Image (tube, grey):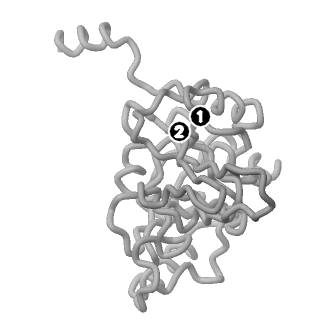
Amino acid sequence: MLSFLRTLLRERRSTSPFPGMVPPFPPRFRGRPAITRLTDGTRALPVVDLGACLFSPEETIRADGAELAFTPAIDMSARARPSLVTDTGRVAFGDALGERMRALLGRSLRLRSVVAGSCAGCEGELTALSNAVFDIARFGVQFVASPRHADGIVITGVVNRNMVGALERTYDAVPDPRLVIAVGACPASGGPFHGSPEIAGIPDAIPVDLWIPGCPPHPLTIMDGILRLLGRLGTGARAAADRAPGAGPST
């Protein structure tokens, strides 16, 4: 116990200062991409689908008079799937939840995780949200064991054929009004498993309220998207995030 208290006094604060600021990331971190024109030509810029992006070094390009490079920026979630397709790297988030929905939720949000054919990468990042570093519970967001106690579900994985029924039953068990958050490249596009005949995808009857890209997304990217959905981050907070060391252009 004394050793723990000495460590606590020495380190002072273990929780991330986000959303007040975004902590610096190591050089190898790959966040929201930026697409820039290298020449004055009229050739159209390449288009990137963040929903299908795996954020791998191989996806960095410098060709056809343009360059795609990853920045340390974490803000890349969107309310609509088409908004993840961009020729600049910037993403239009869309509107936060309406006042009525926010009033119903109050200061809390309970989520049920549905792992629908995943490699477990995204689940690891979701688990990290509850640790002392990110501590998403300080914003009233918690994961619960039963969909009947939840305000919405978080979907990870490609949603393979064997999981469609389980996903639909879980969604049906959540009381109205309910939210659906899709985390990672897999539910958005199939991710690295794109093209597999076993992928069914999210059923059309389950409307997605928030798409969070990444393979897997960083915990702060997930937190950023959820807080924007709840209307707790606005343009001022986004501008502050973009002023972080090495951050990309503001959206």
Sort mark 1 into few (<14), some (14-19) or many (20+) by Cα contacts within 10 Å.
Answer: some
Foreground residue, 150 or 39?
39
Describe residue 226's horizontal placement relative to residue 60 as left or right: right
**139 relative to 68, above or below:** above
Which residue is the site of mark 2? 72
In this view, 219 is above or below 209: above
Q: How many marks?
A: 2
Residue bearing the label numbered 1: 247
Q: Going from the N terminus, do you reach mark 1 or mark 2 first?
A: 2
Picture layout, residue 126 above or below residue 227: below
Q: Is residue 148 visible?
A: no
For the residues labelled 1 and 2, say whether their Cβ atoms are less than 8 Å apart.
yes
Q: Estimate the spatial distance between the alpha carbons at disc 1 and disc 2, rounded to whole Å.
A: 5 Å
* Quadrant containing the N terminus in the rendered view: top left
Q: Element type at marker 1?
A: loop
Q: Of all residues shown, which one is farthest toward the bottom?
A: 197
Q: Amino acid at mark 1?
A: Ala
Q: In percent of the image, x 78 and y 51: which residue is there?
A: 40
x, y (%) of residue 34? 63, 48
Determine whether, in the image, residue 124 is placed left or right of residue 102: left
Q: Residues within 10 Å of mark 2 (few under 14, many from 20)?
A: many
